[in-house]
Amino acid sequence: MPKNKVQEVIFTILMVFVMVYAMICYNIAVETGGMTNLVFLHAFRELLIRGPMDFFLVGGLAKKAAFRIVNPEKDNPFHLVLAISAVSVLLMCPLMSLAATLLFKHAGVQIVAVWFETTAKNFPMALLWQLFFAGPLVRFVFRHLMALVQPREKAAVTEEA
């Protein structure tokens, strides 16, 4: 887990990319009837719209809410990871589904109904993707990335002394 603001930004960027990009691919595949190579390309365009939404809006809110549920000093650290993951999906799924409804679904007067339907389709996928793939993958990559960076930081501190 991140230990300072720079690490927090790096971790959040990784998580936003893996989580949001995958969910965009999922939504495009559902709309078009299946996965194709073009889905991956089209998803990058949407990532530019939806990625900042997660980065700036939901990340901080999810952490604040998770810290109300779990006390990191008393509870198992894994419970904090689960709480942040669950709250992130709980906040992001309806927000991203609303964005998809407004931008791409052409819902007309059925906006609320299409938004609810889109949220219902996205929620199970988002929660499972977050808990079983995106979360573990990003934590693995982040841990190894920080292990590569930290020896250089320690060497720089030693040379200055």
Image (cartoon, helix red, strand yellow):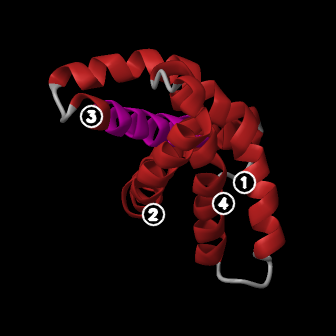
Tag on residue 89?
none
> Which kind of residue does numbered mark 2 sit on?
Leu
Mark 2 or mark 3: whose residue is earlier in sequence: 3
Mark 4 or mark 1: whose residue is earlier in sequence: 1
- The crowd level at tag 2 (other Cα within 10 Å; few <14, some 14-19, many 20+) is some
Mark 4 or mark 3: whose residue is earlier in sequence: 3
Q: Give the residue pinned by disc 1.
A: 62
> Which kind of residue does numbered mark 3 sit on?
Ala
Q: How far apart in space, not on screen, are marks 2 and 1 (Cα)?
A: 15 Å
In which quarter of the view is residue 24 placed? top left
Viewer-side label of 4, 3: 3
Mark 4 or mark 2: whose residue is earlier in sequence: 4
Q: How far apart in space, not on screen, are marks 4 and 3 (Cα)?
A: 25 Å
In which quarter of the view is residue 52 placed? top right
For the residues bearing labels 4 and 1, Cβ distance under 8 angstroms: yes
Quadrant, the C terminus: top right
Tag on residue 131?
2
Q: How many marks?
A: 4
**Where are the magenta residues, as a range?**
11-28
Viewer-side label of 4, 2: 4
The residue drawn where x is 46% and y is 43% is 19
- The crowd level at tag 4 (other Cα within 10 Å; few <14, some 14-19, many 20+) is many
The residue drawn where x is 58% and y is 75% is 78
For the residues bearing labels 4 and 2, Cβ distance under 8 angstroms: no
Q: Give the residue pinned by disc 3.
A: 29
